[in-house]
Image (cartoon, rainbow, N blue to C red):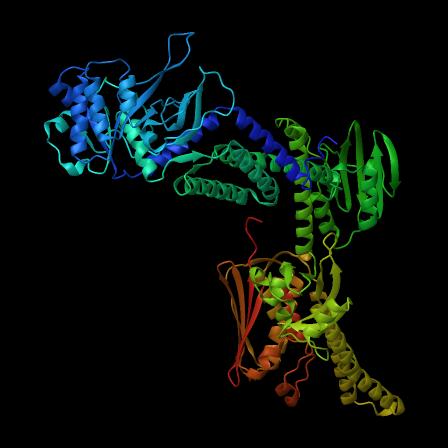
Amino acid sequence: MTKDWLTIKNAPWALGLLLLLSLFVFQSAGLPDRLELWLYDQAITTWPAPVSEKVAVVAIDEYSLSQLGRWPWPRKRHAQLIDELYEAGAEAVVIDLLFPEPHADDPTLAAAMSRHGRVALPVFLSANPPHQLIREQLPTPELATAASALGHVHVELDSDSVARGIYLRNGMANRLWPTLALAQQSLHLPLPENDVPAYVNVRADYRKVPLAGAAGTIPSTSYAAVLEGSHSDEMFAGKTVFVGATAAGFGDILPTAFSGFGLPLSGVEFQANIFSADQQRLLIAEAPEWTSFALSLLVLVILALLLPRLTPSYTLIACMTLCSLLIAGYLLLLFYLRIQLPIINTVLLILFAVPIATGYRLAMTNRFLNQQLDDMASTPHLSLPQPAKRQPAQLLEHFQAFLEPEGWLLWENGELLQIHGMTMAQAPHLSEAGHWVHQLNQSWIKLERGSSTYVLGLTLKNDLSREVTQQYLRDLELESDTNTNSIQHSVQAFSPRLEKVQLANKRLSQMQSFIQHSFEHMPDGIIVTDELAVIRFANRHIEDWFREPMPSLSGMPLIKLLQGHDPKEQPAWHEIVSETLTLNESRTVNLKVHGRDFILHLAPVTLPGDGQSGIIANLSDISELREQQRQHRQVIDFISHDVRSPLVSQLALIEQLKRDPSNINEYQIEQLGKLARRSYSLAEEFVNLARAEQLSETRFYDCDLLAIVENARDSVSEQAYEKHIRLELNDTEDLWLQGNAELLERAVINLLTNAIQYSAPETTITIQVYQAGHIAGLAISDEGSGIDERELPYLFDRYHRQRHNEIAGNHGTGLGLAFVKTVVEKHKGKIYVDSMLGEGTTFTLKLPIADPMG
């Protein structure tokens, strides 16, 4: 129950709740307000408002003070200025100067104001000393009567002490004054609707003023210059002229968004900016307060529904896109609809949505991983148990099963547990646990399990496999390494979760390694396809047999791989594969790939979990089986013809002699002996070939090739002498090999016998023994009739006899050269033949020399 909210189903609600909480935090903090002001300033200063052509400023600047004397000036001088502006064609005059006290020049100033007809004067809302009420400071009654309009000049600064806007109506409760810049356009202003005390400051219709720039942006003319007449009428004609102080330390100054780039803005210039913006309808109204909260709630709903469905990268992109759209909409509203909509709360909500969504996603991921880790940690441990962890009684049982020893013994701490055909008196001294000691066909080992010491003995079969078995036992690790646990426990302790990760990763790696090694080391080729018969996995046998690189196998259609190896008397591959998938039935097909025989089993399979279907193909190499079948047929033919023929001839000759025993002559005896020798020769060569095929390296020993060749030469010297053939041996130093001297000598005898048999009398057979690097070579050359080039590819096949020799009457068994090749290959050597008809034949044997360090 504690983590039910961390689910994909509840993600929108949970994320929405977190975002809503963040929204309330933003609303209660002061940071959004400061950022809102900063965003507005950036927009206004980047794209400042243009200056209206209907505004001008007459500045009481340092030059004017220097020319006209110290302030205050006589009010008749202001009257003179109004007359100058009237003559210059000024449409209206706005004087940003206070005249709260009566003066002798008031009639003159009032008369000038009346002559012009459109002169506005300011009303100042002053703050009295502490604990006193706010009061209005109006011009003198005479001047107020002469003025065409009165307006307030009260500018309230924002929380960061920067002037950005003005209240279009401001005053005490009994009357609201328009702002001075727009006073002549607001003649009828309603009073407050509610009953408000007369001493309360009342404000209404706040507007942001998009300034044209820093101080001096709006064109201004010095007050003294106007009085001096050094101006043109075009400077003021048809314009509203604002008159006020701009000199440093004189008059009111206001910090603005542009103050960072210059001096603060004077009050008169601020009023001029208000008028300029109003003339171009650029004043900016603030959106109702509820719109910002409504916008935030709308974006919150969008984020809560959208973000749980996006990946982290798309979450960031989506949030940045929303922020960009919000800022673009903010600017459009600000500069085209002249409405400022607060968006900082919403922008912060979007920006904070990224870490919130990421954190929520991480929490969900963490919970999911914990569940997966628990599931993986509870899965069975898939690995081969180490023999070192098995009990000796179990080891003995396993040895009895697969070694079938003739005797065994198991001893524990002085007590015999099992015994058969062995005694403890036969046991040698066992100094180290886990190491086998072999005595002839007996093998002994000492094992330690806990506090118990065991002795295990085996009596192996005393045959050719004994040495191989003892070597296998020697390689077994039956005693565990005591340092392993200490090394593992010395590692810094992990948290339970990391231990789960380590355990799960270890088991997963073991499972993957086990499966991979199992597939790779299977004797058969394995192919796994998907539901479209496209190969998704193949082991190395498939790569080797089809001669296709592994990268190209993955993703290759199974039918494409099998094309070109179409089975005989079977449907096409596409029919076989499609029926396996569509009918969900297994198929078995014989095929031939690059000269090798295979049997292919196709079985449909459905994967658990996702329900995907496919094919598992098992390809078995039956080339050896086919070869054995072929050899079996050849043996049957050999026995039925070659062996049976001389025996039948012997029996027939014996029956003939039995009918007339008195007429037995020497020729008949010689024929009978010849047939018997031929039968014996056939049997001997057949047995020799069988022995050669069973030859293994366990029957190898050090032997001298030169001595083998010399013995073989001596064995055939009588045959050579009868045909007056000279055997010439070009010997060298001793060449030692690891091999079987008996079979090697028999192979050399076969080659020499063939050379003598097919050589003409009075010729020479050259025998050369030599060394080339790590290779021992033997070359036997004769001067016989040679071998037909068409016969060479089949020369070493079993039961193959040359057509030329059969016609000439030289009947062989066809096993001699097959025996020679088999012996050479068992010694990891190679045999070559070079022959030309009428010139002779050379057989060359190349065998590896024994390693002197072995």
Residue 739 versus residue 221 in the image, above or below = below
The quarter of the displayed image where residue 147 is located: top left
- Is residue 188 shown left or right of residue 486? left
Residue 322, horizontal then vertical, whole percent: 50, 42
Q: How many marks?
A: 0
Residue 754, horizontal then vertical, whole percent: 62, 77
- Is residue 319 shown left or right of residue 99? right
The quarter of the displayed image where residue 746 is located: bottom right
Q: Residue at point 54% right, 24% down?
A: 28
Front residue of 570/117: it is 117
Q: Residue at point 78% right, 88% down?
A: 668
Residue 135 versus residue 169 in the image, above or below = above
Residue 658, horizontal then vertical, whole percent: 88, 88
Q: Residue at point 74% right, 83% down?
A: 674
Q: Is residue 627 visible?
A: no
Front residue of 133/520: it is 133
Q: Is residue 623 visible?
A: yes
Q: Residue at point 28% right, 31% down?
A: 272
The quarter of the displayed image where residue 603 is located: bottom right
| Quadrant holding the N terminus | top right
Front residue of 129/706: it is 129
- Is residue 173 shown left or right of residue 88? right
Front residue of 431/139: it is 139
Residue 659 versus residue 832 in the image, above or below = below
Residue 308, horizontal then vertical, whole percent: 61, 42
